[in-house]
Image (cartoon, helix red, strand yellow):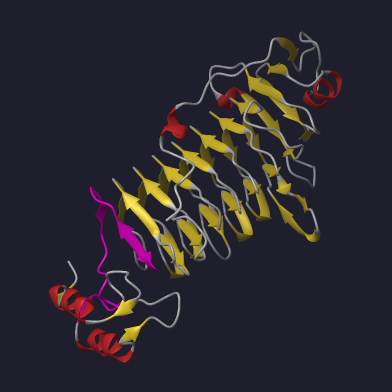
Amino acid sequence: MRARTLTAFSCILLSTTAFADVVTVATDGSGDYTSIQAAIDAVPTESTIQISPGIYNETIDLGEKSLVIEGTGRDASETVIDGTGFKSSVVLIAGDQDDSTVIRGLTIANGDAGSMLPGNPNILAGGGLLVIDASPRIEFCRFIDNRSAFGGAVYLLRSESAVADSVFLDNFAFSDGGAIFAFRGATRICRNDFLGNRAVNHGGAIKVVLGESYVHDCVMKDNIAYQGGGLYWFANEDTMPLEVHGCTILGNLANKIGGGVKSRFGFPAVTFEETTVCQNAPDEIDGPYVDLGMNELCVCPADFTGDGEVNGADLGILVAVWGPCRTAECIADLNQDGIVNGTDLGLLLGFWGPCD
């Protein structure tokens, strides 16, 4: 297996980057500018823009500049970028920025529709924040009531962004990723709360497709989707596992399967460590996963029929697919070795009877 280039330490070693050139923005005229975008347009790259508490009804585009944009209130709730009335992402970062670019201490709210993806003019993504081929840090922010087709609050395309210490509340995706959609990147999603987000299709809170990302120290609660009420993971054989560590995934709902987590085409599977997945409906985890220990996973992996009991019907399914797995989703391969055999039969018999 390839070595993972991201580590848990990337979650905790977020610096307090600030550039020496500083300008201020204030709605009452007490700063250098009254508009955030006016400040962005005026300053050179590698500048810090400090935003006084207030509501800023605008959308912003960093262009190709590396900037630190930070609210100066006591917390993110005091400084709001409000996208009401605009049909684009509230914040756009698509200029090949690295992690010296930081969005910090802001509420990003009421983004409506998002922006077009390159090469896909009919697809709108990132109602609150759209990041394309850039890797900014998003810290101590709140994303509230944003919506788009993909990534109701945030869409990350080919990004190595860190999204940390933030709250995602009541965001909505017309398709996938109610709060965050991460596609083909190496995204670090750390110490965030995902509450009451919704997606019509996949990933009420988060959808991750390919790449080598991880989700650490999160709370996912009361999120809803058709599949993957909390989290939806899509992989292929060339993808690193999605690492879920120290999370609480509780009380989420899928209208079909994967109330807590949906792991699709699970080679490699989602890995769980020090994580709780419980009280989700109609099930906890659908698809392959790896238990790395110290988890509370309220699952019954041998209940293939989902009737709350491991019985003859489940045994029949296992016998019917005996031998090498023919599809990526091989639910009877309980030990995830690519073949249904006597080992899996022994595991099934060990679960026999009503699910606890």
Position of residue 222 measured from the top left corner of the image (x, y, whole percent) = 43, 52
Q: Quadrant of the C terminus?
A: bottom left
Q: In this image, 41 relative to 315: left or right?
A: right
Q: Is residue 304 above or below residue 207?
A: below
- Figure quadrant of the N terminus: bottom left
Q: Quadrant of residue 50?
A: top right
From this viewpoint, is residue 332 visible?
A: no
Q: Position of residue 93 (x, y in %)?
A: 73, 37
Observer-nearest of 2 and 315: 2
The residue stretch that appears in magenta: 285-310
Q: Quadrant of residue 107?
A: top right
Can residue 255 be seen? yes
Q: Is residue 216 magenta?
A: no
Quarter assignment of residue 95: top right
Residue pictured at 46% horizontal, 52% vertical: 2
Residue sitting at x 42%, y 48%: 220
Seen at 66% across and 32% down, the residue is 98
| Relative height, residue 165 to residue 297 (above, below) | above
**The furthest residue to the front:** 2
The question of residue 299 being in magenta is answered with yes
Comparing 347 with 126, the one in front is 347
Instruction: Pick whichever, 134 or 287, lies toward us.
Output: 134
How many discs mark residues in the rendered view?
Answer: 0
Relative image position of residue 282 (x, y in whole percent): 37, 68
